[in-house]
Image (cartoon, helix red, strand yellow):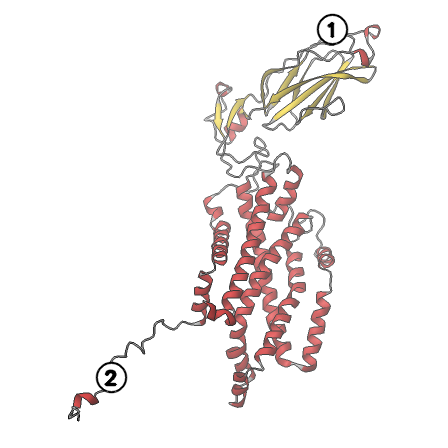
Amino acid sequence: MNNYLPSPADFLPLTTRDSADRLERPSMSYWQDVWQRLQHNRRALTSLFIVVALLLFTTIGPLVWQADPAQQDLEQISQAPNLGLRALVVDDFPEVRELAAGPVSPAQRLPPEKLLAPANLRVLGTAHSEGVHLAWDQVPGASGYQLYRHELNPSGPDDLGLPLITLRGTSLSYRDRLGLQTIEYYYSVAALSQRRQSPNYRTLAVTVGQAIRLSEASYRGLLASADSSYIGSHVQLEIHPLGTDYLGRDMLARLMWGARTSLFIGIVAPLIYVAFGLMYGGLAGYSGGHTDNFLMRFADFVIALPFLLFMILFKIAFGLGPGESGIGPMLIALVLLSWPATARLVRGQVLQIREEPYIAAARLMGASAPYLVLRHMLPNLMSVLLVSLTFAIPTAIFTEAFLSFIGMGVVPPTPSWGSMCNDGIRTMLSHPHELVFPALFISVTVLAFNLLGDGLRDAMDARMRGDS
């Protein structure tokens, strides 16, 4: 028999919990749980970092890289990405040495088929971007010469390239200054007789170097003065990490400023029409009955309206002509025609929430309609709206890029990624960087927002919270 007698200490309250009753994990709020689940999704987390980097690129980038996006540098047209080219300083008005042959009488002229190819086709001096001086020997029996320039090696007399000049008489030289770039050109010359061209021609491959005129180098601060003693020396040109476009404008600066235009339209427009869709769909779902039916039939009508047609009508209504930027009409068209999708989504969620038991309990306790909307329905809609917004932003960015690409949206000189793609499509074969970089930014941005929206949808889905 146990003779234990209880003492007063046995009746004191417990001050600590038993280890079996201790919580192993602290309780978290809904948004803390969403953030933890999002961290486990590597694709969504990487996309979030990319979105943040794009926003920093757009806002802080122009403060760091202060190149003027509208400044044209005709000395560096369509340059590939570089860290500063070395350019030869040349005279503004170089002395051109003209070569000529003796006159050819009509009796001495030969039929075009019998004319030989010009011999000794050569470059006089140095071939650079400010001029290529070509010369060749006289062809017996020729009354003139036709000079061509090609970026590829000609495959025959019908593929000599761009006709530069037709020289009639005794001229045996020509200085080419027509839009030269620092690439390799193939110059071809053929003799003429009886106003026809000989099938025989001579081709010379010429590599054009970078050059800059003396006055231009002095004006841009690359030289201390415009003294002629600097002619023949070399200077270091500005750095262009992503190259230049067809007008010599810095691609990195234009991508930064173009991001402001593209992301402004891509973020502001979805914020407006998602907010409007929230109010419209919430009113339809909460009201129900005939009001719901009327409002949703109107939303179906708006969905059926053609977006491109209304974009054209808005441009006409704003008085914008060809070549004028259509940022305003684009924003209005996106806002007026893109809200029904959000409205339908919100209506469905409100119809589901208002039938929940806790809503019925709140009504029995005398809760008013504003209280139910603000305290119960709106917080439960935030996750749906956030996911809807992350999917709406890439759609708006792609729409802006498409409209600018076809000339209906943002047009030069205002930069945007879509208009830059439109400019780059012209030179995509010879200078692909002008198209690749803006297209890459559009693709990465759209993909990042889509993956982020997909990750947010999974993280905010209450049915998946028990999986982690």
Residue 167 is labelled as none
Which quadrant of the rendered structure holds the C terminus? bottom left
Who is closer to the viewer here, 110 or 262? 110
Q: Secondary structure at mark 1?
A: loop
Above or below for 468 versus 199: below
Q: Residues within 10 Å of mark 1 (few under 14, many from 20)?
A: few
Which of pointers 2 and 1 lies earlier in the amino acid sequence? 2
Who is closer to the viewer here, 53 or 152? 152
Among all residues in the image, which is located at the extreme front? 1
Residue occupying image coordinates x 59% and y 74% = 349
Q: Secondary structure at mark 2?
A: loop
Who is closer to the viewer here, 219 or 70? 70
Instruction: Locate residue 7, reporting x and y percent.
Output: 16, 90
Which quadrant of the rendered structure holds the N terminus? bottom left
The quarter holding residue 267 reads bottom right
Above or below for 60 versus 11: above
Q: Gap in Å between the C-alphas at discs 2 and 1?
A: 122 Å
Q: Is residue 294 visible?
A: yes
Instruction: Locate residue 414, reporting x and y percent.
Output: 61, 47
Instruction: Locate residue 422, reporting x and y percent.
Output: 65, 44
**Amino acid tagged 1:** Gly
Who is closer to the viewer here, 216 or 345? 345
In the figure, is residue 331 to the left or right of 108? left
Q: Are marks 2 and 1 in contact (CB under 8 Å)?
A: no
**Amino acid tagged 2:** Leu
Residue annotated with mark 1:
102
Give the number of callouts: 2
Instruction: Locate residue 461, reporting x and y percent.
Output: 52, 69
In the figure, is residue 150 to the left or right of 61? right
Residue annotated with mark 2:
14
